[in-house]
Amino acid sequence: MVLSRGAGWLVGALVLACVVVVGPSAPGGFFAGSPPEEDVRDVVPNRVMTWNICNPCEESDQDQAAEIARYAPQVVGLQEACVRDVERIRDHLERSYGLVYHVEYGAVLRNWGRCGGVPWRPGEYGQAMLSAAPMTDVVDEEYPDGGSEDRGYMAVTTTVGGQSVRVFNTHLAERRQEAVRAEQARVLAAEVARHDRAIVLGDFNAVPYAPELDDMWALAEDADPQCHPTAGGDCEVTTDWHSKFDYVFLRGIVPREHHVRPSRYSDHHLLYTDLRGAQEQRAS
């Protein structure tokens, strides 16, 4: 049967419409070519990470998610975090890498310049915590004096390496505000001291031998066993300006390995630590 020219156009249009609605019948169909998702992976159950993700830095949420996925920590504490950005990072981690995280926020202010939104409803800014295990007993506190910008800490109870532990995440006042940081560290240390086992993540904006960190050093140790609160301590730098400002402090917990990894997506490096399990700690 020979179709008229008009009928031929009609049949062609109907065929194309079916393809759009139903889709191709084989992987090599008309609309094949979407990039495949990455291999699904699991988190490292005894690994914790801290990262100041830099804001504003105009980096891609996908790139930041890829950096976290590379090390796949059980828990990661983020500083300078916008709620909307962290939501997208978590979505990328699940969709592209199969890493499913719970999230809690420690927002200390609403800031349109940093986090976008509309002037009457700017985005929330502060800390955030991602954990593969659920988090309970969430605390979000602002320091009495934030210095030049509101600052605070958050705390959760979650599972790391099969054990329940209290995890803190903080960002202390900016540089050249030593007295403010000293008071903030005192407030934080008083809360950490209530727990026999605790992990403290964050950007302290102070080098290890700075006096304002004395209260933290009095009750916890750096995850890097070579790093001590002395000018001669062998501490790896954690920033692009060659200072150590970022810490994984441990109280009642023993580290197995500690790593610092520079990232082109922030002016702070990523720090992650693998912790010893309960049996290993008892043996030590």
Image (spheres, rainbow, N blue to C red):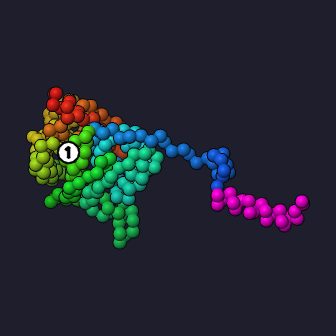
Left or right of 263: which side holds 220? Answer: left
Left or right of 93: which side holds 103? Answer: left
Q: Residue at x 30, y 64 (%)?
A: 110
Q: Nearer the viewer, residue 212 or 167?
A: 167
Name the spot of residue 10 as percent of width and height, x first: 79, 65
Q: Quadrant of the C terminus?
A: top left
Q: In this figure, what is the number of numbered marks?
A: 1
Note whether residue 219 is visible: yes
Q: Which residues are magenta?
A: 1-22
Q: Nearer the viewer, residue 125 or 220?
A: 220
The residue lying furthest to the right in this view is 2
Q: Residue at x 38, y 48 (%)?
A: 100
Q: Residue at x 38, y 56 (%)?
A: 87
Name the spot of residue 127 as percent of width and height, x first: 28, 54
Q: Quadrant of residue 18?
A: bottom right
The type of residue carrying mark 1 is Val
Q: Quadrant of the N terminus?
A: bottom right
**Is residue 42 covered in magenta?**
no
Q: Which secondary structure, mark 1?
A: strand
Per the image, the residue denoted by label 1 is 165
Q: Nearer the viewer, residue 209 or 259?
A: 259
